Image (spheres, grey):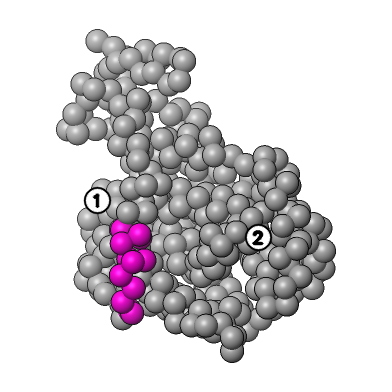
Amino acid sequence: MNWTFTIGPRTFVLDQALARQVLAGKKIINGKVSEAFNLLPLRYPWSYDLYVALKKANWGPYAGEIPNLVATDISDGKIPNHRGFINTAVGFLAPRGSCSESRITEVIREKVTAPELKLILGRRPQEENIGLDCFLFLTDRLHIDPAQCSRGFWDSPTVREIFDLRGREAGSICRTMSLASPEEQRKLARAVFFLGACLKGVQFQSIYTEIASLGRSGRFPALSTIFQNRRRDEDFHVEFLRRLFLNLLSENPAIRSADFDAELIALMGETVALEKNFVRGRLADDSDGGRAERSNALVDLIAQRRLADFGLGGTLPRAALGVQAELMETRFAADFPDLEKSSLIDPGMSDDDL
């Protein structure tokens, strides 16, 4: 008996008995390592769906409408109380702060064994190139000194604290680590949580929200579009890492414990504290009209949502922000409406078959 899989215009016929053997060997970690990049049959179709959606959303700063919007950004950039914030936002795009994130991503990609799980993680170099393109595009068009802008951002004390946290977490894992014991598996699970929930999910989200606010008011449309696209890409990664984390814990229940949950909640608390320090040090000023308070409340809200999405029931102190809370509750559903509708899932395959 055969299984038929359709991917786009192509149809693949698999021997059912052999396909079952392949599925049995596919795991998040400690599965059968394939010498070839054999995707089918997919055990984790959600991973392939996210990869395809991310590829379709591919973009760059020199294409589409972004170059046509820069004239407005140049005009808005002449407003004195905007210049400092714009330098901060553009400095954030400088490639200097990406090495720790790349190291964590590379280790996770090395240690997961199902080939479909490696697809999104393998796009990291391409996204670094897009970030560099955006940095060069904006510094050129907005007449910003790239070296000064980069140093001004990454050498600030509050950003160095965030960078130190990234380096510490990156140094706790390596590509040669063994995943035979629950203790080693917890290190990988912590790395997945940190990368998805903390680093991509919370750190520097205040920049994205501030730029989105400027965009809604019609200011800096090119910058706003660039950051909107980058945030969309990051949301794909957050969703991928969320599912990876939950499946990793499901397949390896010995990882989970009350102490481990508390450890991750504490890590999120540290991330939140650093993000609030960043808001005070880089985004707030005497004439901000309550920007720091609003940003801090939103950081609390986002962090709480990340904890819930990653299956953690702990709570963090936070301020009430009802309207934003309602928006955040519907955000993932709006961004990923079709994740459960995969054309790659055989309709006759039950969960027991997997």
Label 2 belongs to which residue? 220
Q: Quadrant of the C terminus?
A: top left
Q: Residues within 10 Å of mark 1 (few under 14, many from 20)?
A: few
Between residue 244 and residue 287, name the one nearer to us. Answer: 287
Q: Amino acid at mark 2?
A: Phe
Name above or below for residue 130 compared with residue 12.
below
**Where is residue 339 drawn, in percent x and y?**
35, 38
Q: Main secondary structure of the magenta part?
A: helix
Question: Residue 250 has which mark?
Answer: 1
Question: Residue 77, located in which quarter of the rendered image?
Answer: bottom right
Sequence order check, earlier mark of 2 and 1: 2
Between residue 213 and residue 128, name the one nearer to us. Answer: 213
**Secondary structure type for disc 1:** helix
Q: Residues within 10 Å of mark 2 (few under 14, many from 20)?
A: many
Q: Magenta segment range?
A: 318-329
Between residue 82 and residue 31, name the one nearer to us. Answer: 82
Q: Amino acid at mark 1?
A: Ser
Name above or below for residue 244 compared with residue 152.
above
